[in-house]
Image (tube, rainbow, N blue to C red):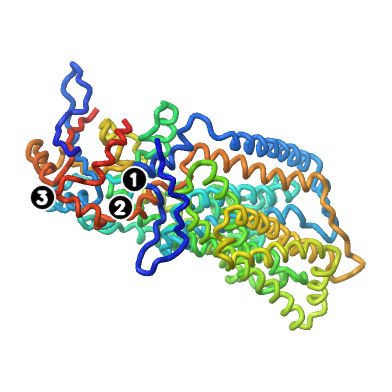
Amino acid sequence: MSTIQAHDIDNTGDVPGKRTALVLGHTDFHQVTNTICRPNETRKPPMAWYIMFGISMLLVMNLGFVVHYLIFTGVGVWGLNNPVMWAFDITNFVFWVGIGHAGTLISAILFLFRQKWRTGINRFAEAMTIFAVICAGLFPGIHVGRVWLAYWLFPIPNQMDMWPQFRSPLLWDVFAVSTYFTVSLLFWYVGLVPDLATMRDRAKGKVQQMAYGLFSLGWRGSNRHWHRYERAYLLLAALSTPLVLSVHSVVSFDFATSQLPGWHTTIFPPYFVAGAIFSGFAMVVTLAVPARELFGLKNLITLRHLDNMNKVILVTGCMVGYAYGMEFFIAWYSGALYEKFAFMNRAFGQYSWAYWIMVSCNVITPQLFWFKKVRTSIPLMFILSLFVNVGMWFERFVIIVTSLANDFLPSSWDRFVPTWVDIGTMLGAFGLFGVLFLLFCRFLPMIAIAEVKGVMPQADPHWEGWHQSHGAGSNPAAAHSAHGDPS
Amino acid sequence: MTTLTTQTSAPSSTVAPARLYGLVAEFENPAQIVAAAEKIRDKGYRYWDCHTPFPVHGLDKAMGIQRTILPVLVFVAGAAGCTTGLALQLFTNSFNFTIWALVWVTGYPFLISGKPALSIPAFVPVMFELTILFSALSCVGLMFLMNGLPKLHNPLFTCDRFRRASDDRFFISIEARDPRFYRSKTEADLKSCGAAAVEAVVED
């Protein structure tokens, strides 16, 4: 099977009055199906897949160990102390929830804005969302200490005859994150059903046929079904859009509604949402670059897709930089002594190294994306996306730890130093994410097959190619029927 | 190539002849299926459908599909979610009624940071989340239910040719239970629309 090597065609420019091709090197629908299904249908994934899976699996085993150690010993095994009662646990929670936001932004908001380039990346960005929220959910689950009492979080009658306290943002968070997970999963699954039907119809083995057949629910591409499906998809996008903005706002309420200097600010909800999209897009680039390389998807996740994502990273990076500056301005302008101290302490106090890592990774390095050469260079964008991931992790660390460690009374100040359990749990979450993502790459179509076909010019019934051939007998589709029946 | 063939995809066996489910016609591109759907619609068939690998623009109109009422149902579900959120929070945090909800439960009027018992602004986030949750669950659930899914088996799946409906081909199926279905006439109708192939599908 010879694929047209079209990925060196530059589709990053715009010609006025013309639509830029989003799918390169594929002249018919069957080729698209083949390209996307190939990584799932090959007998063995590439060697790099096994190596990454091995590393991730080791980290997951380590996660299992440290979590058990934590539960059987108590949260004292973390480096937490009296003023710093939240540190790595909540840093990781906010980091992972934030990562998830890019997936929903791509699947919902870009859908509502008719950004057709989203079809190339939405499937695995949504998968990333789900796995990131799973990693996020782990941390509040284990940091409560007595994990066996986690059901106190939910409004279920319990032995104390007490209810959860609904005026607390921590409880809003329980509802926001669990709703977010459920809705993201539904959105992802609804998008998957037609593609699972494609996998079912192509499957050679009995097991694959049964599995894909079961989860495709008997989808047969009926147009009466497509009609309701498209409505439902639009509704889900419209529901997810306010949801994704609300989730990180509610996460920021955990901080903003407290009275701690450095947390108690009104800028937090928009600032957290911008930061979440920033970090999430960086993670999408981090995952997309190796995935398109390894699985031969360069013609579907083209340079234009990556260029667009880098532009989003640049914009949200500027928003985050603006928020950092505005926090300092408000601290000075408010005249509040404690607020002023909190910010001077961030930049020049005991955690100033973390603060400057954050500023250089989140504000300074993304500015390189102003240059098209950088936005379209694969190695540079990969490195910059890693910088952003690191920077956004440190942002949460700085916000949480600096504010807690040095609050109102100098006599109660302390210092947080992570223990090996803290670090083990953090790395373990990356392992969990890696395992889930690699399994997804192996067994599910990484790109939305039906949606990509829908944005090809050939999908339009009025495409000129279909009408020139009418009656002439030289149908371009007929020329491709030599691909053979998949039966 | 475009050849007009009619064949029965049922395995030839000695048992009683299987009941005809309907006819399936294959088309090669979106332009053809839209044109064909308009013709089939105008012939007055009722139990027929188009099968495409992706939603084809304009096919709903060509088939004469009525707009689904799904959005209305989702709105009702969302309103129910919002009400549930408010009722849940008022009951558990603002009053001390006792009601029966599978077990006897009593509310508890929390006094937190001097906020009033009916502190609606603090209840907004959870009301919002439950609105979205109820809407999204009912949206997906009702969409599949109205589509008659999950239904893992359909006679169309016995047709090998039909597998390409999820890949690169476009199909029209007309069921035998349609009052206007006559095998030879329907077959001629489908062929006259420019079908590349017409095949009979039997119930199994």
Q: CA distance from mark 3 to mark 1?
A: 30 Å
Question: Residue A435 at what x, y percent from top left?
Answer: 61, 40
Mark number displayed over residue A238 = none
Helix, strand or loop at label 2? It is helix
Q: Residue at x 7, y 36 (%)?
A: B184
Compared across the picture, whether A337 is left or right of B170 comes to right
Q: Rate crowding at label 3 as few (under 14), some (14 to 19) or many (20 or more) other CA atoms within 10 Å.
A: few
Location of residue A156 in the rendering, given as x and y in whole percent from the top left corner:
61, 50
Between the residue at mark 3 and the residue at mark 2, the CA separation in whole angstroms equals 28 Å
Q: Which residue is mark 3?
A: B43
Q: Splitting the image into 4 quarters, where does residue B188 fall?
A: top left
The location of residue B70, given as percent across then percent down, is 34, 57
Marker disc for residue A458: 2
* Identity of the residue drawn at 40% across and 44% down: A4
Q: Residue A29 bears which disc, if any? A: 1
Which residue is rendered at x = 14% and y = 45% of the image?
B194
Q: Select label 3 or label 2 by which is in front.
A: 2
What is the secondary structure assignment of the residue under circle 3? loop
Distance, label 2 to label 1, CA atoms, is: 8 Å
Contact (Cβ within 8 Å) of mark 2 with mark 1: yes
Residue type, label 3: Lys
- Residue at the image position 25 percent from the left and 46 percent from the top: A476
The chain letter for the residue carrying disc 3 is B
